[in-house]
Image (cartoon, coloured by chain):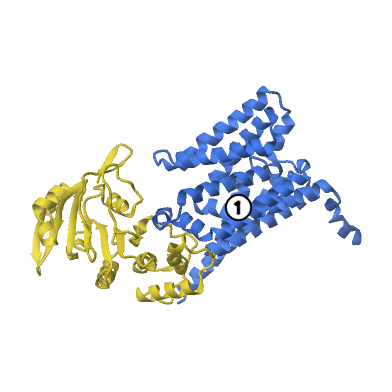
Amino acid sequence: MSFVFAGLFTPFNYQFFNNGIIVATIAGALCGLLGVFVVLRGMSYIGHGLSHAVFGGAAASAVMNINYFVGAGVWGVASGVIIGRIARRRLIGADAAIGVVTTASFALGLALLNRYGQAKKSIEAVLFGSVLGVKTIDIVAVSAVAILSVVIVVALYRAFLFATFDPEVAQVSGVRVAWIEALLMGLLSLTILVTMRVIGTLLISALLVIPASVARMLTNSFARMLWISPIIGAVSAFTGMYLSYFLDTSASATIILTGTLMFIVVYAVTGLRGRTRISGLHHI
Amino acid sequence: MTCAYNSTLAIKKIDFTIRKGDFVGIVGPSGSGKTTLLKAILGSIIPIEGHVTKKPHLRMGYVPQVETVDWNFPVTVLEVVAMTRSSTGRLPRVTKDERADALLVLERLGLGGLHNRHIRELSGGQQQRVFVARALFHRPELLVLDEPTSGVDVRTRHEVLHLLADLHDEGVSIILSTHDLNGLAAHLPRLVCLNSEIIADGSPVEVLTPEVLEQTFGAPMGVLIHGGMPVVVDGVGADIAERMSRLG
């Protein structure tokens, strides 16, 4: 019995796993927090898009031998700002703006890596994430972005709420909506930048969308969503990372599948609760 | 002033004044520039020519069309009302004073006891009043409403009209846009007929005439006087009725 129990802690004997699970858990909470704004603004595609844009920056910085965080970070923030600017011209719309800017960036990154002969393995690591590549600097970076995000969201809570719910009236009421949107895009870009090494480009958008969607099904309060969503993100990241060790599956894929399982359970339970409430009304 | 979206003119050479205590309705067909005019007054659209001159530090409250509201957004009535202090309020939570102020406004608008409800759980009239409450929470001197009776039933329309009349009696100046000629516009003291430019400006009796209405809406309309108030009737009504009776 004690042998089995001890076996449960085996993954924690490896430093790479400890680094990975810390980054993944903080990343899950961070994506959960910012995902609330992404989901409520109906911009679920933004995470997908920005991660593709950051891939372009990561490839360019590798080819040019620039620090990953500097190269990919500048690229990601620039992409976010460009998307925001294009989206404000209503003729095109946010979805098309994201599609054009980010897929172009992704294609450029892919072309650069093909042309300059980067190893296939490194492309896979960027696309699907790699727990082996996590270093102490990643823990510091993701913690710093998480603290920064919490401080900004708490300090500007009302402006964020107003600008998300009703940007037009918020603008008239003195909220600097364009500034709030740029700030949110910047935080999203930073989040993707510091979490991409573990989660990977292709699956990070799910970590932005799933926890917030689960939280939305659980509460009708914006304030409560802001703490439920990070908890769900952190729990699914921790559990998924842990299970991936025993299942011998990709960490990022297992994290997303854990989150998806939570989504299915909550969807089923809240749907059932709704139906019970309606059938109860028939008896009145 | 003149306003445009890209290269398309929305309103041109608009020149009119809203004085303290005014209650003005902007009427016109869809696409006539009513919302553009309101947004220019609010300052969210900058005219390409001319300008809007306002009293310094004028407090304005804006009630958008309820049809544009995301009713699934996770907010309670109290959170919606307290939103307008976003630029001044620093604490995430609604403070004790703000809560007391908000509850007072809600009580005044007949929404007492509903502050913890989700906005979707209210009736049409209550939903409209929540957004008026949000605008009033800002203690506005000028209340700007975009189509306040659009898509609401007759009872809600009466509620909104009575509420606005009460606010006007209390000294709030009001400007609203509407295409509801009989249900809302005819009850207001002053109307401005708009179709990209001002067609007429005056009391309902002066403005709601067949000539002005045809020029504004581009369709023939008749006007009857009922109890001293103009009632607009569709000019093609008889023709349509005759064609329909032939079908029957």
Q: Residue at x 63, y 59 (%)?
A: A265
Image location (x, y in percent) of residue A175 = 45, 55
> Element type at marker 1?
helix
Q: How far across and how far down the image is residue A117, in percent?
A: 71, 24
Query: Residue, x 50% and y 40% (percent of image)?
Result: A83
The relative height of residue B191 versus residue B130 in the rendered view (above or below) is: above
Q: Which of A241/B197 is in front? A: B197
Give the vertical position of A135 relative to B201 (above or below): above
Q: How many marks?
A: 1
Report whether B19 appears left or right of A97. Answer: left
The crowd level at tag 1 (other Cα within 10 Å; few <14, some 14-19, many 20+) is many
In the displayed image of the protein, which residue is found farthest to the top?
A115
Name the amino acid, label 1: Ile
- Horizontal arrangement in the rendering, residue A20 relative to residue A52 (left or right): right
Whether residue A153 is visible to the viewer of this picture, yes or no, is yes
Q: Nearer the viewer, residue A168 or B45?
A: B45
Q: Residue at x 62, y 34 (%)?
A: A57
Residue A149 is situated, as x and y percent measured from the top left of the image, at 61, 53
Using the image as rendered, state which of residue A115 and residue A76 is in the foreground: A76
Mark 1 highlights which residue? A210
Chain given the colour blue: A
Q: Colour of chain B?
A: yellow
